[in-house]
Amino acid sequence: MRNRGFTFIEILMVMIIIGVIAAFGIPRLRNSLDKQNVRSAKALLATLVATTSSVAVSRGCPATLNLTVDSAWVTACGVSPPAASVQVGTKKLIGDDFNVKLAPSVSTVIYDPRGISTGYTVVTVGVVGTAVTDSVIINQLGKVVRQ
């Protein structure tokens, strides 16, 4: 009489092979996810820079890109009637959304009504992930030159 099925040794060998494959694959997958989070945070920062410049031009008043360790948001004058500074759009919680930290060289970048930065200095915003670090550089005129 013949028994069908797998022996304990065969199942044990399959489990060992699966464990070895997982031991190599999981860290690589985690590193890839961290790289993608840093890239996405950099793209969002570049979008916020462009948004700040265009809001300054469209509203005809200074607009400010505010940067903290974990978030970024845009403020400008109100639309009707032009009032004190109001938030444009929503505050982007970059730290929570992408699991990264920001390291901005300044806390605000102000754009004049022409869409040009008023600081005339190069601003570097470091994006620090778990294992990957990169940065976004905003030139003297307020344009992203390295993303």
Image: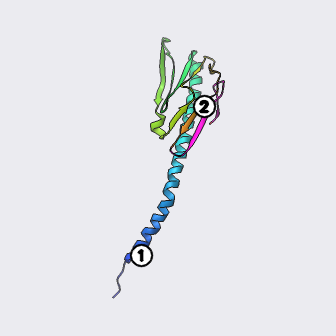
Return the residue at label 1: 10
Q: CA distance from mark 1 to mark 2?
A: 56 Å
* Outermost residue toward the left in this view: 1
Mark 1 secondary-structure assignment: helix
Q: On the rendered structure, is 118 left or right of 101?
A: right
Q: Quadrant of residue 39?
A: top right
In the picture of the structure, the residue carrying the numbered disc 2 is 124
Q: Is residue 19 in the magenta section?
A: no
- The segment highlighted magenta reads 130-146
Task: For the C terminus, give its image quadrant.
Answer: top right
- Quarter of image, res 104: top right
Position of residue 35 relative to residue 7, above or below, is above
Q: Residue at x 54, y 33 (%)?
A: 103
**What is the x, y in percent for residue 137?**
62, 32
Q: Where the N terminus falls, by quadrant?
A: bottom left
Q: Give the residue at x 40% y 76%.
A: 9
Which tag, 1 or 2, sits closer to the chain's start? 1
- Is 48 placed above or below 37 here? above
Q: Which picture quadrant has residue 58?
A: top right
From the top left corner, tell me how far across and down residue 12 is, in percent.
40, 72
Of 11 and 2, nearer the camera is 11
Q: Amino acid at mark 2?
A: Thr
Circle number at residue 72: none
Residue in the image at 49% along x and 32% along y: 69
Q: What x and y, as percent, mark residue 18?
A: 45, 65
Say few, some or many: other residues with alpha carbon within 10 Å of mark 1 (under 14 / 14 to 19 / 20 or more): few
Q: Is residue 4 above or below residue 48?
A: below
* Residue at the limit of the structure toward the bottom, as seen here: 1
